Image (spheres, rainbow, N blue to C red):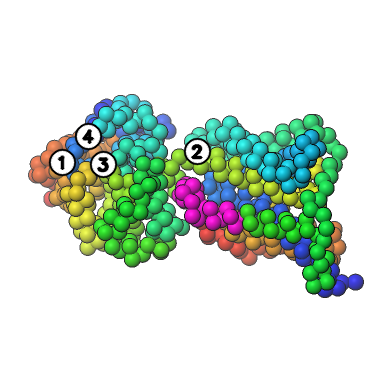
Amino acid sequence: MITAKLVIEQLVNGLVLGCMYASIASGLTLIWGTMKMLNFAHGEFYMIGGYFVFFALNLLGLPGIWCLVIAVPIVMVLGMLFEKSIIEPLLGRPGWELSPLVVTVGASIAIQNGALKLWGEHIKNLPYYIDGTVEILGVRLAYQRLMILFVTAFVMLGFWVYTKKSRFGLGLRAVAQDRDAATLMGIDFKRVYTLTFGISCAMAALAAALLSPIFSINPWMGHAALTKGFIAVVLGGLGSFEGAILAGVLLGSVESLAVVFLSSEWKDVVSFSLFIVMLTLKPSGLFGSKEW
Amino acid sequence: MLKLTQVDAFYGDAQALWDVELEVGSGEVVTLLGSNGAGKSTVLRAISGLLPIRKGEILFDDVRLDSIDPFKIVGQGVAHVPEGRKVFPSMTVKDNLLAGAYHSNFWGKREETLGGVFHIFPRLSERRNQIAGTLSGGEQQMLAIGRGLMSSPRLLMLDEPSLGLAPKIVEMIFEIIININKNGTTILLNEQNAHIALQVANRAYVMETGKITLSGAASELADNAHVRSAYLGF
């Protein structure tokens, strides 16, 4: 039976799921907005983020939240190394429209299979970072889920303010809007690209680190995350940070409500239908015309 | 101050500059004349490093500009106001100007320089919080010049500042350019409107299909038969 309590509980679950989509999508859209490329290996940085938290927990035996604090910056550095060694050499060569796509699809396959070989196909589980629940208005909410909401909101808002207020943010926006003009202002766009890529990977890793206790870790987890991330990016409007976050949260909520009102098998049908309707009615997405 | 020696540059396999020799002395206004596609913009892009050169050298004071990274050139005191203004369309006027002071040599003094630019362009001060993409063409040109001035350049390169602007606005922009020069900034000006360019400049170079074909004092070139028929329409 569908009760108001169930709907609210599912809505909270939807927001949590939406936070994951938003984190993934904002990283993708950030890369698209500045570098004008799609990163098909993005899901793999998400996956690596999950594994690194798992290893930190099991090898170092630190509390969960410290594992997250260690794993996320490591993935950020890995992302920067990836950009520097694999993406940067493609810059300035003919075929930029296609070359990063081919390279990142290849990297995605390689990383996924590397993870399978190294870490095996067994699904790994993480304990909750914080146990316990709180009851608000008769609805029982796990601290873990509330933490995901708060941390994601805090990080996204923090990054948004950072791009609007800091010197690096100014450089990032300048590069995104006109790379040549930015160069004339003394902005090293290659450095901006590397850092942007790193930040984007860190956001993916953060999403994985926060959600792994709820979902679980396996070598293929990046694939589904990437697909939903792309849907959110397109729904929000390619290149729009605000759009990606809003669309991510929207997508997660809609999926969770679909579980209540239809069934869990219909979840993806609903999200893809939403995607198709959006593409038909407003192909530029919610914030399509907005640039950085 | 600026000296180009035997500069060749290419777009892909197509040669765009042939043996370009050009000199700008401290305090001068030098203009490059020529029709569309003659290579005027390419010369400025070569100087500011956006288009790496294949042969020759570009010397600014004692620094080889052609051997340093493009994003470091503004730090040497060369500002390039590109063709088509190229303001950052989704940023506010103020953020556009601050971006002009991004280089670490100028970032610390940005508020002070900003005041100076607002003094030159009161219109930009009025519109400081407006999104640059919504400004009129003339205002965008002012913004592009103002952004260039945010690095307190010793050499200011202007690429077609009159393009697409009403005559009254062009006059106003050129008055400002003259004032900037009077305050000690050397100017290298690309301009299709030869009338106004030869009035403002001390010296001029004429470019045709990627080569410098004529050069001399602006007053002499204004009397030159070829320049008169090809660029001044007499």
Magenta range is A156-177
Q: Which residue was labeled with disc 2?
A: A190
Q: Secondary structure at mark 3?
A: strand
Q: Main secondary structure of the magenta part?
A: helix
Mark 3–mark 2 CB contact (< 8 Å)? no
On screen, residue A143 versus residue B145, left or right, reads: right
Q: Which residue was labeled with disc 3?
A: B155
Residue type at tag 4:
Met
**Is any atom of residue A279 visible in this view?**
no
Task: From the top left corner, tell me how far across and down residue A208 is, in percent.
Answer: 73, 47
Q: Earlier in the sequence, mark 3 or mark 1?
A: 3
Q: Which residue was labeled with disc 1?
A: B203
Q: Secondary structure at mark 1?
A: strand
Closer to us: B69 or B151: B151
Q: Nearer the viewer, mark 2 or mark 1?
A: 2
Residue type at tag 2:
Lys
Q: Nearer the viewer, mark 3 or mark 1?
A: 3
Mark 2–mark 1 CB contact (< 8 Å)? no
